[in-house]
Image (tube, rainbow, N blue to C red):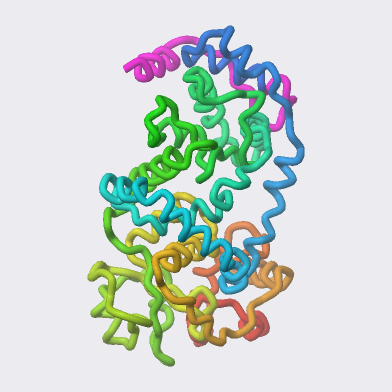
Amino acid sequence: MRNVLTALAFLLTAQPALAACGGGFGSFVNGLKAEAVQRGHAASTVDAFFAGVRHDPSVIKADRAQGVFQLDFTTFARRLISQSRLNSGIANGQRYSNVFDRIEADYGVSRGVLLAFWAFETDYGSFQGDFNTLNALTTLAHDCRRPELFRPQIFAALELYEHGDFDPARTTGAWAGEIGMVQMLPGDIIENGVDGDGDGHVSLKTSAPDALMSGAKMLRHLGWRPNEPWIQEITVPDQMDWSWTGLRTTLTPSEWEKVGVRPRSGRWLSNQPASVIIPQGRKGPAFLAYPNFSVYFEWNQSFTYVLTAAYFATRLQGAPVFNAGNPEPGLSGAQMKQLQQKLSARGYDVGKVDGILGANTREAVQAIQKELGMPADAWPTAALLNRL
């Protein structure tokens, strides 16, 4: 109720103009402080919270340099999934077996899913990032690329500070402001934080039970369907209508069987409508993506990261190494930018011309392949670039 009344008061009272992104950093911070007071926070608390905040150029540098996502799925997966990381995941699954039992009972999230996130985000808590979190959030909110994402997180961090769960001077994490073993933003911690070890605090940096339970609750909040699968490796026929592949098309497993799709091993894990995804085209790895797979994109927007995390979760639960197949060579970063420019010139929305095969570019590639009478498997190759 307090939050509702505070919000209403904020709307009904005169408020100072908020500092726009991209201006002077000091003026921007003063605008944040004024807004915090308007939101109902004590002025003395606000002053103490922002007392040491600084602009961090290294955060902006990290935000602009995410070249790892230019890698294809097989290369990316092999880089992230080592035998050591797999062994550690299995050991942590056993060590925290009671916690995972609670998670599966309360939230219906399989242990492999959380173990994979834990592994990729912080290597099971061993490196959680050394960026000052308040500096990172304020720097990114001041930057004009995504201020709408990071500005609210500053006020969420202020709320955590008031609860004794955030230290503006000492709390550190990832460059993008995520905190703890599974890397959650302050707003997500407030909404989905769980005191898994019963000590009265939600400590995602030091308590594995807190981090894992909180991550599970967040996944459930984002739409995770309890006790259902997320992906399954499949085989695809040599010939089919490849334009059916991708997340836009869903059929039941029995309907996919009619066109020659089969589980690589065992039986279908569900009868729910699902999508065939072939991250490196019709000659590469192939998976069936069940409804829970879409929830991964609420955690991370990179298709390559999401698929790798989803696949690693199945490996941690006993699935075999995926069949890499023999895909046609992909494009270099420079070639991908050239392709994106050509597609954009033809009226296709590829998003930013950044050399990354994101969702928009995949859809544009598939559409132009179909237009040109090529196998529409959404995998950009030199042959496609030459045709254009």
**Residue 196 sits above or below residue 10 on the image:** below
Image x and y of residue 346, in percent: 60, 70
Magenta stretch encompasses residue 7: yes
Among the 4 quarters of the image, the one containing residue 176? top right
Q: Residue at x 71, y 68 (%)?
A: 333
Picture mark count: 0
In the image, 172: left or right of 370?
right
Question: Which residue is painted at 54% across and 17% down in the image?
Answer: 36
**Magenta residues, start to end:** 1-28
Residue 349 visible (yes or no): no
x, y percent for residue 105: 26, 48
Q: Nearer the viewer, residue 54 or 193?
A: 193
Image coordinates for residue 263, horizontal then vertical, percent: 34, 80
Across and down, in percent, residue 239 comes to 41, 91
Residue at the image position 53 percent from the left and 81 percent from the top: 324
Q: In this rendering, does residue 152 appear at all?
A: yes
Where 318 sits versus 164, above or below?
below
Instruction: Please state, as top left, top right, bottom left or bottom right, where the N terminus lies in the image.
Output: top left
Residue 59 as seen in the image, left or right of residue 363:
right
Which quarter of the figure is the C terminus placed in?
bottom right
Decide whether residue 379 is among the magenta residues.
no
Who is closer to the viewer here, 295 or 369?
A: 295
Name above or below for residue 366 compared with residue 32. Answer: below
**Nearer to me, 93 or 184:** 93
Instruction: Indicate left or right for 339 with 16 as reference.
Output: right
